[in-house]
Image: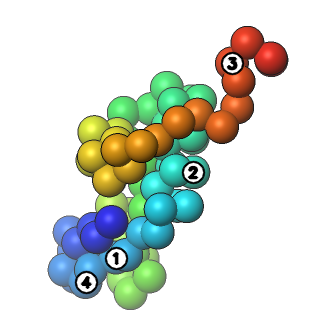
Amino acid sequence: MQVRCTKCHMPISLSKDVVYAALDITIDEDLSHYDIRCPHCRKTNRVSVEQLKHAAPGYQRERDEEAE
């Protein structure tokens, strides 16, 4: 997944593992977006849950909710 920084316009590349981890965090904490920090200018960029789900169409929760 590619995200462009809103301040310096540098592209930020996110691997599938990062996208899956971000989805886990946003679902666990009931967030509407995930914050990604630009490695170039260090500005925090928001990525919505919808964008994350679009980048990971086969996403399945690894943890079983009933086991907890």
Say what amino acid the circle numbered 3 marks.
Answer: Glu
The span from disc 1 to disc 3 (Cα, nearest Å) is 32 Å
Q: Where is mark 2, residue-wise? A: 21
Q: Position of residue 23 (x, y in %)?
A: 49, 42
Say what amino acid the circle numbered 2 marks.
Answer: Ala
Q: Are marks 4 and 1 in contact (CB under 8 Å)?
A: yes
Q: Position of residue 4 (x, y in %)?
A: 23, 72
- Seen from the viewer's position, the closer of residues 25 and 44 is 25
Q: Residue at x 27, y 46 (%)?
A: 54
The span from disc 4 to disc 2 (Cα, nearest Å) is 22 Å
Q: Where is mark 3, residue-wise? A: 65
Note whether residue 48 is visible. no
- Quarter of the image for residue 10 reads bottom left
> Where's the N terminus, which quadrant?
bottom left
Q: Residues within 10 Å of mark 3 (few under 14, many from 20)?
A: few
Q: Which callout, 2 or 1, points to the residue nearer the camera?
A: 2
Note whether residue 63 is visible. yes
Going from the N terminus, do you reach mark 2 or mark 1 first? 1
